[in-house]
Amino acid sequence: MTDISSLEQTVEHRLLQDMDALAERLGRVRQQVERMIYGQREVIDQTLTCILAGGHVLLIGVPGLGKTRLVSTISTVLGLESKRVQCTPDLMPADIVGSEVMEEDGDGRRHFRFIRGPVFCQLLMADEINRASPRTQSALLQAMQERTVTVAGQTHEVPSPFHVLATQNPLEQEGTYPLPEAQLDRFMLQVSVGYPGLGAEREMLLNTTGAGEDGPLSVLTPAELRDAQLLLRRAPVGDSVVQAILALVRDGRPESSDIEDVQRHVAWGPGPRASQALLMAARARAVLDGRLAPSVEDVLALVHPVLRHRMALTFAAQAEGMTLDSIIDRLCERHG
């Protein structure tokens, strides 16, 4: 019994050391990103939280708020190979996943060769994803969920780690195709990007219009990021956090909720993937802040970006001017 207890203490001590070292590295990651992105601390933290948790991010914001700059900065700081796809209505699935072409060698023999598309990278930016057709949007589904793509019956693995950071303009809806619920559910977080404060915008104005600007430094490597993602899954989670996640998610479903606003105004609620996303994101947020285990406060801080794209209002609720954020606020009040 003594040997087993001693071994458990050694494992726990090693876990604490590894977590402390990871928190220190992540602090430097955050510092490098904030050097390039002004006045968006919450957006930066939510994006880093999602990547650390192994998920994909949907960034919602009007043009000119630095979404593209955020993605390129994160790819540099995390040492990830990144590619960018500008989504347009005429973009085809093969333009994303790749295609097979027939080639002829010197002996006249013909064979097919697979040419990889931009999805074969570690950080893919899908710019204005809602401008791509539903057929092209669906080309990302398999890659986002299974980390593979299938072309001509052959399955190809995408690099690891693999993350999709997609952007969407919430204002201009002409010529766009709303993302289907199945695709939205693959994004761990939907992050709202707002305008920076006055002080941050002033700092940005002065620093980005001068003779030169130092770029971000690389802090992690892809292998170190994979190790961090695996280490995150070993972080302990208290029963109170698990219970809070289950209560929040289940109360967001009209079938199982006893909250009147949810029963009357929600057409469909979040599924089990929302619970998984909340737990992983809460763990990542805690580690990003230098804490070993997540708290209920971490869960409440992430409820909006995790749930807002996994729920839908009824037509009557939309006509009455209800919003999903107000429904989610009600959930937080109930379980906060």
Image (cartoon, rainbow, N blue to C red):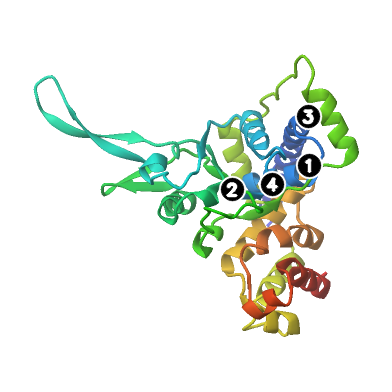
Instruction: Of the two numbered discs 1 and 3 on the same chain, state the one appearing first in sequence.
Output: 3
Q: x and y percent of residue 279 in the render?
A: 67, 60
Residue identifier under label 4: 62
Callout 1 amino acid: Gln
Closer to us: mark 2 or mark 3?
Answer: 3
Q: CA distance from mark 1 to mark 3?
A: 11 Å
Instruction: Return the residue at label 2.
Output: 54
Kind of residue at badge 2: Gly
Cα gap from disc 3 to disc 4, whole angstroms: 22 Å
Judged by depth in the image, the label closer to the viewer, 1 or 2, is 1
Along the polypeptide, which appears first: circle 1 or circle 2? Answer: 1
> Which amino acid does the dot numbered 4 rest on?
Val
Say which amino acid is labelled 3: Arg
* Kind of element beneath mark 4: loop
Sequence-earlier tag: 4 or 1 = 1
Q: Earlier in the sequence, mark 2 or mark 3?
A: 3
**Answer yes or no: do the residues labelled 4 and 1 have beta carbons within 8 Å?**
no
Residue lying furthest top? 211
- Return the x and y of residue 305 as percentages of the image width and height: 69, 57
Q: Give the Cα distance between marks 2 and 3.
A: 24 Å
Q: Earlier in the sequence, mark 2 or mark 4?
A: 2
| In front: label 4 or label 1 | 4
Quarter of the picture containing the C terminus is bottom right
Answer with the quarter of the image where residue 266 lies: bottom right
Label 2 with label 4: CB-CB less than 8 Å: no
Q: State the image quarter where residue 320 is shown.
A: bottom right
Return the x and y of residue 87 as percentages of the image width and height.
Answer: 50, 43
- Which of the two labelled residues, at mark 3 and mark 4, occupies the earlier sequence position? 3
Residue extending farthest front: 174
Secondary structure state at the residue bearing disc 3: helix
Q: Which residue is mark 1?
A: 40
